[in-house]
Amino acid sequence: MDVIAELEQHFRAKLDSMAVELRTEFPEITVSVTSGLAGSLTGYDSYAMHLSCTLHNRKVNEPDSVVLEFAVKHVNANPVFNYADVCWDHPSGFIEDELAGEEMSYSKEVLTLIETGLPHLFASLKEAVRRGKPSNS
């Protein structure tokens, strides 16, 4: 099985379920689950999955979304787990939480790492949404 299909098979339904929970608990936000390729012009050929929460009525200098995301780069040859985190968008870019601080070769252990870490990251995402701003502000 290729890396992209494996990530989608393992995590799409989980992220969709989390999105339903977020929409129920926080009806005032917009929640989306996305995934896709990136980095083809840089040679990284990454694939990322995102659970994004958009907060409305924000000031221009405040981030309006926070996302739970994870990515694998070099998906076409020698894949490498790149990151799994909860991060605010521009202008903050603050990382609320992350699973691993360093890259590692993609493997079944990486799938297990993401799978076992998702509940923790999801709790961090919910707390960030509840707070409505990065924890460092």
Image (spheres, rainbow, N blue to C red):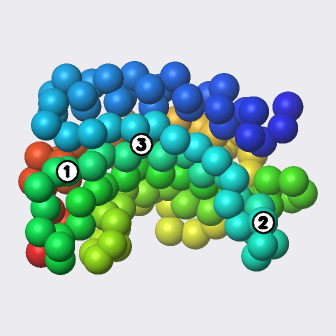
Residue drawn at point x = 27 percent, y = 39 percent = 30
Which amino acid type is shown beneath numbered disc 3?
Leu
Which amino acid type is shown beneath numbered disc 2?
Ser
Q: In this rendering, which labeled residue sits more in front, label 2 or label 3? A: 2
Q: Where does label 1 land, which residue? A: 55
- Percent of width and height locating residue 19: 35, 30
Q: Secondary structure at mark 3?
A: strand
Compared with 1, 101 (above or below) is below
> What is the quadrant of residue 72 in the picture?
bottom right
Q: Where does label 3 land, which residue? A: 51
Task: Identify which residue, 76 or 111, lies in the foreground.
Answer: 76
Using the numbered discs, state the Cα–Cα distance from disc 2 to disc 3 in whole angstroms: 22 Å
Q: Which mark is residue 40?
A: 2
Q: Going from the N terminus, do you reach mark 1 or mark 2 first?
A: 2
Which amino acid type is shown beneath numbered disc 1?
Leu
Using the numbered discs, state the Cα–Cα distance from disc 1 to disc 2 in whole angstroms: 30 Å
Residue drawn at point x = 87 percent, y = 54 percent = 76
